[in-house]
Image: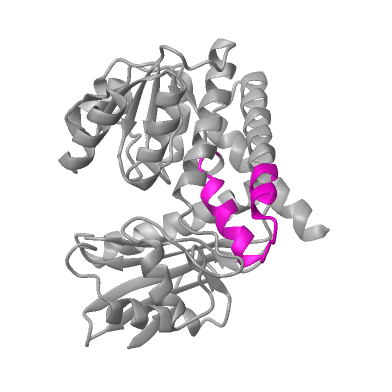
């Protein structure tokens, strides 16, 4: 296995990880350790090339810096990606090789479950390094963070809807959910229980069929999700989906979901604002998962209360951001970044 530093003017550390024996190629990016060790999940996707993977890990790790600060955690921002199809290319040997790369950073980066990974995979990583969270077993094990992520997004949807319409009641509202992975599917459960009507899409047809059967959801083709008429759009798949091509198609009043880096560029946040669409900044709305993971990293004995308190505080942070954005006639994304940078400066000075 080889670990090669990658030069960067935006990140503290970036490494390319390769292992010939297992076919492993991946990256680890530490955007900031200003508030504590960098923390963020390990993602496995069939990227089309290494440049795409590098761009993704850089954007995701920067987003984790903002997410952790917004949630009031003593953690910096980091992320890791492995190039490959998790259903085909993933193996215990490959995961152990990547874990050894994480271990070589000596605690400057903690990883956890993300797209293409599971608590079982985290257990394999933990055989090689202690810098892993999201484990299913152990005194402080936090398990799959997806349900907590979904709960936080559900809270954020209600808060955003209340800000936009005066009521957070979701009964009878139509919500379009893009992506039915762990987070998206749990979110559908919360939304269905709250009385919302669901329109769903995913590249996995089995998940769509399951959502239709369990939640009475209406299925739609992946490319049609942007133009569907709904009250709320909840992106819960890949990032960069809010862009110059998709924004003009949108027929919703609120966007709030679990995907990271939903905006292709900062200008797209302004475009949504100009269009009268309320955008809940993703790194605030989807912070529940890292809160859950942080309870394990910090070895919190009463995890339930810790998570509940942090989720409540995060929801208050979102409400404050949305109110400030309205008063200042700015995009919530721009206000959120300013707010988070101020939090980071304040926490560092303390």
Is there any visible trace of residue 224 in the rendered image?
Answer: yes
| Residue 310 counted in the magenta span | no
Q: Is residue 81 left or right of residue 79?
A: left
Colour pattern of the rendering: one colour
Q: In this view, does 81 lie to the left or right of 50?
A: right
The N terminus: image quadrant: bottom left
Residue 337, by quadrant, is top right
Q: Residue at x 41, y 76 (%)?
A: 125
Residue 134 position within the rendered picture, expressed as x and y whole percent measured from the top left:
49, 62
Report the predominant secondary structure element of the magenta stretch: helix
* Total count of labels: 0
Residue 15 position within the rendered picture, expressed as x and y whole percent measured from the top left:
42, 76
| Residue 308 counted in the magenta span | yes
Front-lying residue, 96 or 46 = 96
Magenta segment boundaries in residue numbering: 285-309
Q: Residue at x 35, y 59 (%)?
A: 55
Residue most extreme to the right:
350
In the depicted structure, whether residue 240 falls above or below residue 216: below
Residue 3, by quadrant, is bottom left
The C terminus: image quadrant: bottom right
Residue 96 position within the rendered picture, expressed as x and y whole percent measured from the top left:
36, 81
Q: Which residue is drawn at 57% across and 53% down?
A: 292
Is there any visible trace of residue 263 in the rendered image?
Answer: no
Q: Which residue is drawn at 18% across and 41% down?
A: 206
Residue 77, by quadrant, is bottom right
Front-lying residue, 53 or 200 = 200
Residue 278 position within the rendered picture, expressed as x and y whole percent measured from the top left:
49, 22
């Amino acid at each position: 296995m080889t670990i090669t530093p990658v030069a960067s003017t935006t990140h503290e550390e970036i490494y390319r990880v390769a292992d010939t024996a297992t076919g492993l190629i991946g990256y680890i990016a530490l955007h900031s350790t200003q508030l504590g060790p960098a923390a963020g999940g390990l993602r496995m996707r069939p990227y089309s090339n290494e440049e795409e993977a590098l761009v993704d890990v850089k954007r995701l790790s920067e987003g984790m810096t903002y997410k952790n600060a917004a949630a009031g955690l003593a953690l910096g921002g980091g992320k890791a990606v492995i190039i490959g199809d998790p259903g085909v290319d993933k193996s215990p040997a490959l995961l152990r090789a990547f874990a050894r790369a994480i271990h070589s950073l000596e605690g400057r980066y903690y990883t956890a479950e993300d797209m293409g990974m599971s608590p079982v995979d985290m257990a394999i990583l933990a055989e090689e390094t202690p810098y892993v969270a999201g484990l299913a077993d152990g005194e402080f094990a936090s398990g799959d963070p997806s349900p907590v992520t979904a709960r936080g997004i559900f809270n954020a949807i209600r808060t955003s809807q209340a800000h936009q319409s005066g009521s957070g009641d979701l009964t009878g509202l139509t919500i379009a959910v893009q992506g039915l992975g762990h987070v998206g599917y749990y979110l559908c459960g919360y939304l269905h229980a709250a009385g919302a009507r669901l329109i769903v899409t995913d590249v996995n047809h089995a998940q769509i069929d399951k959502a239709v059967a369990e939640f009475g959801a209406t299925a739609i083709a992946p490319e049609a999700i942007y133009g569907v008429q709904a009250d709320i759009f909840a992106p819960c798949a890949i990032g960069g989906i809010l862009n110059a091509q998709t924004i003009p198609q949108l027929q919703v009043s609120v966007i709030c979901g679990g995907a990271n880096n939903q905006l292709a560029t900062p200008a797209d946040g302004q475009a949504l604002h100009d269009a009268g669409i309320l955008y809940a900044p993703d790194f605030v709305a989807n912070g529940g998962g890292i809160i859950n993971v942080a309870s394990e990293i910090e070895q919190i004995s009463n995890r339930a209360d810790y998570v509940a308190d942090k989720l409540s505080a995060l929801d208050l942070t979102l409400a404050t951001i949305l109110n400030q954005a309205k008063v200042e006639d700015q995009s919530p994304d721009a206000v959120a970044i300013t707010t988070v940078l101020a939090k980071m400066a304040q926490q560092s000075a303390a």
